[in-house]
Image: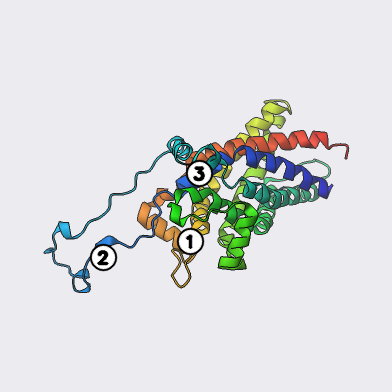
Amino acid sequence: MGVKGFVEGGIASIVAGCSTHPLDLIKVRMQLQGESHVPNPAVQTLRPALAFQTTTTTTSSAIHMPPPPVRVGPVATGIKIFRTEGVAALFSGVSATVLRQTLYSTTRMGLYDILKQKWTDKETKTMPLSRKITAGLIAGGIGAAVGNPADVAMVRMQADGRLPVSQRRNYTSVVDAITRMTKQEGVTSLWRGSSLTVNRAMLVTASQLASYDQIKEMILENGLMKDGLGTHVAASFSAGFVAAVASNPVDVIKTRVMNMKVEAGQKPPYAGALDCAIKTVKAEGPMALYKGFIPTISRQGPFTVVLFVTLEQVRKLLKDF
């Protein structure tokens, strides 16, 4: 039964991940909007003797502040990618998505299923919400640790098209990405941002899987709908919304930390997750942590629906095994 849960969860996750990959790519591009590591020109263009003067004798023409970057929505982002990079760019990093779902989602879905079977009351056939959340936290954390290399590769491949041509990494596949990262930046680069990945995965899995099971039970217990496609869609979309709200801030920081380019002998743009969060909020405001929320829910909703609807169908197919 334990192996069966991993197989069912893995198949459903791969189908859901591939079918919603373009939405995930748009989300990543939007989360990176406004990010800049260019030194402050107001200080860089002044001589040291003038950089710390408090008088107002310096004319405004001596200091040129660049205008804030224009932020665009998910539809405009998608159209821009299509026009400048081609339709194939919407599936950049899909090989990494397949590997990520194979490692991360298969692990978390399988472990959650095992814990659910162990912790479900044998008489009432129910499981308290607190145990569902705990099972999700455990399964999500372990799954994220296993799948982090593929997650880093996926973020980089999705974000590559927004860089100038001379700065692009141009990974040909997830294997190429992981191989080059290991050679150029060391093995530890494969687990860059892993603490964020683990935290996000714990939040997503606990909110997504626990919410789905709880909402599905409530619908069936109150007789609102029968156990069928309608119930599965309603419960899964609700679970997707809960997961998006809970995980978006961590997801923004995770994306930026994973995507940062570390040059040999130079200080990295971010010292860590907390440093990235502080710099992001200072530079762009608190709502920057919910940057890309519309594509997140636009992706998380369909992803969760496809995930659980596929999972329910796969369970029916494999019920005799």
Q: Which residue lies furthest to the left in this view?
A: 57
Residue at mark 1: 261
Quick one: SS at disc 2?
helix
Is disc 3 surrounded by few (<14), some (14 to 19) or many (20+) residues within 10 Å? many
> Residue placed at 82% from the left, 45% from the top?
4
Q: Quadrant of residue 224?
A: top right
> Residue placed at 67% from the left, 44% from the top?
209
Q: The disc labelled 3 sits on which kind of residue?
A: Lys
Tags 2 and 3 in contact by the CB under 8 Å rule?
no
Q: Nearer the viewer, residue 121 or 190?
A: 190
| Quadrant including the C terminus | top right
Residue at mark 2: 43
Quick one: SS at disc 1?
loop
Q: Position of residue 92 (x, y in %)?
A: 56, 45
Is disc 2 surrounded by few (<14), some (14 to 19) or many (20+) residues within 10 Å? few
Visible residue check, residue 133: no
